[in-house]
Amino acid sequence: MTTQALKVENTAFLIEKLASECEPLQYVRELTVNSIEAISARREKGWTGEGEVCWDVDWTLVNDQGIFKLQISDNGTGMTGEEIERYINSLSSSSREQGFTANYGLGAKITAGVLNPSGLIYRSWKDGAGVMAVLHKDVDANVYGLQQLALPNGQYGHYAPLNDAAKASPIDESGTAVVLMGKSLEDNSFRPTNMPSKWLIKYLNSRFFEFPEGVKINVREFHRSDPNDWPTSPNISTGDAATGGSQNRRIKGMKRHLEEHAGVVLGKAELSNATIRWYLLPEEKIQQSDIWDTSAHVAALYQSELYETKSGRNAYGRLRDFGVIFGYDRVVLYVEPKRNMINVMSNTARSMLVVDGKPLPWDTWASEFRNNLPAEIKAMMDGIIDSSSGRDHRDSIRRRLRDMKALFSVTRYRRSASGNLNSVGSLPGGIERELGGTKSKESSRSNGGAGGGAGALYGAYLDAGGDQASAIATHTNFPEVRWVSVTDRTRVNDDELEDRAALYEANSNTISVNRDFRVFDDMVEEVGSRYAGAPASEVIDVVQEWFSQQLVEAVIGIQSLKGSPAWATDTIGSALSPEALTTAVMPRYNTMRQITRALGARLGANAATLE
């Protein structure tokens, strides 16, 4: 018996669908890795030369057509014409080791091919013989494939011979160059629209943690940002006022940039199934942000590449999850899964890593790191806290709220055969148990899912037709309050607190209140005008105390709703978001009354009133 092999129709749709799931610059990664692997394959055959990958322009097209096209070239194994037909013109086909943790045989053809429908021009030499082929999109037929070329003998084929005059550096006896033609002949694919002049340098430095020993990665850098001022020859290194110049810049990867920069403190933290490489950046801002990621960021490290990178403001929340509450603008974390302990691989688009098909366990890693913070990071945060100002209002807030404690605990109900109430609805957990027995049953009255185990023993609502139950009270967990400000470095500009009142951290049960928020400034100014003789520090302290209480009440009130079928985890998160906490402090009539009364009691003056 034989099996008819599965075929793919409308490959253009499949190719473009796969490409749509990739990051915009993924093609740079794919072509770079292909070149590195080609160099490694040549070494395996006994070659001992220095490997080189060069991102440049195709200078032949510059001279002949006056157009700048991006080109990558290497001195790897190269390909014959037959190999180009086999590997370039077939999906999921590769001359390298293919596997779930190795080469997929998809990347460059998918990502670069779709972005360059005018063509990817391959020029390749193997053992001294050169060939050319063009992978493009035939718009009329709506297919991607190798373009038919006219041969010297008058016939046609999908690859044509080349002489050595067409070689690009660093190709010698072997190597490959790929020219990206863009969407049309006029496209400047070296400088895509709306991209900064050093986009390629920064992407490569920030995507790769490090490169293999014995492989150089170079990128052409033009001294002038306007392509009209670019030179027409690679030999112009300085140029005159009219043409400018260019140079090759060596790409290091993030490891060397971070470890070679003065003032960076670094170390490793071992977790149960991962290693965290951490870096503490110097207080003074690092320059050269246009060529590498000089800001705080968090990423997963896998096979010398960085995945799922969150940088700058996008990284601050994750860094706080990892326990970096202060000075989060100075910390870089790379989490490297231990592959002998965790089944990790990249998704098809290489945009993220998965473990058995699921997202990376960021929450677990954050908890382990948070519970054993490196001493250097703790010392940095302690220094910031010591230099900040402000009094601790916890005791006074707790004392005032003690008599109202019952109001901050939303009543729940324990199912009990001797109870005098009737309740329905289950807290999250699974399948309910029968009261007085061990057999499980589906609940017909659960709202939002039945509770299993202990969860099934609790009801959320009173209902005349419900189970017998007794009322219970929930525990109130008072959060800690910290007032933070850009001025004392307890927060940074343009973080999640920018023009927001406060941020709640569930992991540490902490409210960070933004001292720079204009509503607080307005209140201090207004109260100060009513008590012109009061010390400014007293006014600020009282204002902060009462706004702290307002936020504490909001947080513990929302916390008491946890476990209700109507309040899922993400809903609780929304109710405790910076925007929601900002809403909580906006009513100011009663807050003003409390502040003025407190100041009056301190200063012996009559409290101000609002008419």
Image (tube, helix red, strand yellow):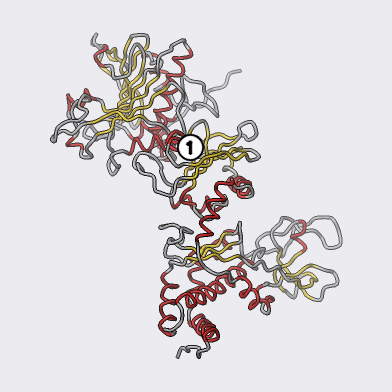
Residue lying at 40% horizontally and 14% vertically, measured from the top left: 49
427 or 381: nearer the viewer = 381
Query: In the drawing, does residue 284 fall left or right of residue 361?
Result: left
Q: Quadrant of residue 183?
A: top left
Q: Residue at x 41, y 15 (%)?
A: 77
Residue 419, horizontal then vertical, whole percent: 82, 73
Give the residue drawn at x 52%, y 55%.
383
Q: Quadrant of residue 149?
A: top left
Q: Residue furthest left?
A: 242
Give the vertical position of 302 relative to 385 (above or below).
above
Q: What percent of the width, then of the height, locates residue 12?
A: 39, 33
What is the total number of numbered labels drawn onto the structure image? 1
Identify whether 155 is placed above or below 365: above
Q: Is residue 29 above or below residue 494?
A: above
Residue 378: x and y in percent read 57, 50
Quarter of the picture holding the N terminus: top right
Q: Which residue lies under the disc numbered 1?
A: 306
Q: Nearer the viewer, residue 393 or 38?
A: 393
* 363 versus 43 height, above or below: below
User: For this rendering, which residue is in front, 527 or 81?
Assistant: 527
Image quadrant assignment for residue 480: bottom right
> Left or right: 577 with respect to 417?
left
Secondary element at tag 1? strand
What amino acid is at disc 1? Leu
In this rendering, position of residue 249 left or right of residue 594: left
Q: Residues within 10 Å of mark 1 (few under 14, many from 20)?
A: many
Q: Residue at x 33, y 24 (%)?
A: 178
Q: Is residue 138 left or right of residue 590?
A: left
Quadrant of the drawing holding the C terminus: bottom left
Along the line of sight, the residue nearer the viewer: 545 or 53: 545
